[in-house]
Image (cartoon, rainbow, N blue to C red):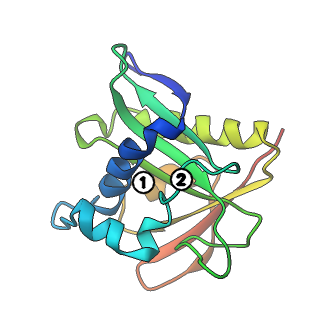
Amino acid sequence: MQNVDIRAATPSDLAFLVDMLVEAVNWLPERDWSRERILADPALAHYVTGWMRPDDVGVVAVKPAGQPVGAAWLRHLTAADPGYGYVSDDVPELTIGVVESWRGRGVGRMLLRAARDAARARGIPRVSLSVERANFAAKLYAAEGFRTIESFENADTMVTDIRA
C-alpha cells in the first residue's frame, strides 16, 4: 500500500467518521445523500452519534502528512436500536468508508484487517456488517472471512469470527 499508515481512532475523529459514513452510504455514484440527510436518519446516524463511547473501536488510514483517507469502526448497537447488520447486542457492527479517490488501492483491506486486530485486542469474538450485494466491497468482506448469515432484498448481513 502506498504511503498509508493506520492509527487508532480518537474522539476527535468524529467529523471524519461522519464523512466516511457519507462515503459508505453513497457508494453508488447515482446515490447522493447529503451529510444532513444521513445525520437526520436515525437508522444511519446511530453509527456515529455520541462517538466515542467506551466500547467503540476504530482505526483511521492516514497519508504521511496525517491527512485521513479512510476509517473503519465498530459499534455495539442494541435490539432496541439495531443497525442494518445487527446480529445481537454483544456483536459490534463494522462501518467502513474510504475517500473515493483512494478506493481500489488496498486501503479498505488494510482498514478491515486493522479493525479486526483492534477487535481481537479488545476480546471481541465476532463482528458483523451489512453490505448491499451489488457493492464491490462485498467481495472484499467474503475474501477476508466474513460469511453471510442473513439475506434481504438487496443486502446481506455478514459475520466474521475473531480468532486469536
Instruction: Tell which of 62 and 147 is nearer to you.
Output: 62
Residue 141: mark:
2
Instruction: Tell which of 49 and 71 is nearer to you.
Output: 49
Disc 1 marks a residue whose amino acid type is Ala
Q: Which quarter of the rendered picture does the N terminus lie within?
A: top left
* Horizontal arrangement in the rendering, residue 26 relative to residue 114 (left or right): left
| Residue 60 rendering spot, x and y as whole percentages | 47, 34
Instruction: Tell which of 51 and 43 is nearer to you.
Output: 51
The residue lying at 33 percent from left, 24 percent from top is 67
Total marks placed:
2
| Residue 53 rendering spot, x and y as whole percentages | 63, 51
Query: Callout 1: helix, strand or loop?
Result: helix
Choose top left, top right, bottom left or bottom right for residue 99.
Answer: top left
| Residue 19 rendering spot, x and y as whole percentages | 32, 48
Q: Which residue is mark 1?
A: 137
The residue lying at 63 percent from left, 68 percent from top is 77
Classify 10 Å Cα crowding around label 1: few (below 14), some (14-19), many (20 and above): some
Classify 10 Å Cα crowding around label 2: few (below 14), some (14-19), many (20 and above): many
Q: Are marks 2 and 1 in contact (CB under 8 Å)?
A: yes
* Horizontal arrangement in the rendering, residue 30 relative to residue 116 (left or right): left
Disc 2 marks a residue whose amino acid type is Tyr
Q: Which quarter of the rendered picture does the C terminus lie within?
A: top right
* Horizontal arrangement in the rendering, residue 52 relative to residue 31 (left or right): right
The residue lying at 36 percent from left, 30 percent from top is 68
The residue lying at 74 percent from left, 70 percent from top is 89
